[in-house]
Image (cartoon, grey):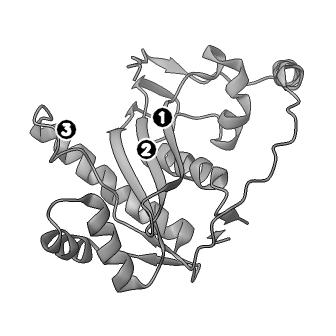
Amino acid sequence: MVNYKRKETVIYRASFPLLTGVTLYILLFLLGCSGKHLAPVKEMELDALTCIIVTPTATPVNLNENISYQQAQTLEKGAAIIDTIIMEKLGGSKQFRFATQKQMDAALSENKQLRMDQLRTVSNTLSCNSVLTTDVNRFRERIGSVLAVDSAASATIQMKLISVANGRVLWEDVFQETQQPLFGNLFSLSKASRRGFKWVTVRELASSGLEELLIKCPYIAVD
């Protein structure tokens, strides 16, 4: 529970091999040796937020004429799935208020010119001084099973936290991943372990990516 506070890669048929005790020990040793000790990051001064509005996930469907009907359908389906995941992760905190698509459309009809005007209208309605936006630009399901795939799950998700008062972006980050075979990248061992050493669905990949993004946001504390 979270509380307040392309390069295109073609994956040919591949599978996760069973890890022997010796192999796993070697991998853990390599991972430990690869760790870098970073200097402590100086704590940043954060803006005071009354609460955070979470807007519905947006897609580039209406902005890109080159997107096919099938691609549009996939992205819109992905946006709906991402909205569900975000609600699961943030819905338990009173510091987050979720804007509906109806509210977003109504705000846009009043302010047709600027996206920021739309966000301000919604923020006034829900009485918050910041907005968390999410955009999905890639959402591709795996072709295969948990053991072997012809094409791995892939997703690109961007999140921004915006101050309504001045339009300043307080924080932003992007999750972009096409799942790789474990032995194609030994240093992905930790991530592969969390995923159960299997080929995940795009929903599972997106959930993992959103968790990574939210953990990085200095305005959000993850239990």
Q: Nearer the viewer, residue 196 or 210?
A: 210
Q: Nearer the viewer, residue 188 or 214?
A: 214
Reply above or below: 106 against 27.
below
Q: In the rendered image, which residue does mark 1 sit on?
A: 176
Which disc is residue 86 wearing?
A: none
Answer with the quarter of the image where residue 198 lies: top right
Which one is in front in this view, the residue at disc 3 or the one at disc 2?
2
Q: Nearer the viewer, residue 190 or 15?
A: 190
Question: Mark 1 and 3 residues: CB-CB less than 8 Å, in contact?
Answer: no
How would you rate the neighbour count of disc 2 (Cα within 10 Å): few for under 14, some for 14-19, many for 20 or more? many
Q: In the rendered image, which residue does mark 3 sit on?
A: 71
Along the polypeptide, which appears first: circle 3 or circle 2? 3
Reply above or below: 25 against 214.
above
**Secondary structure category for the residue under label 1:** strand
Along the polypeptide, which appears first: circle 1 or circle 2? 2
Which disc is residue 157 wearing?
A: 2
Q: Residue at x 65, y 50 (%)?
A: 216
**Secondary structure category for the residue under label 3:** helix
Q: Which residue type does callout 1 highlight? A: Gln
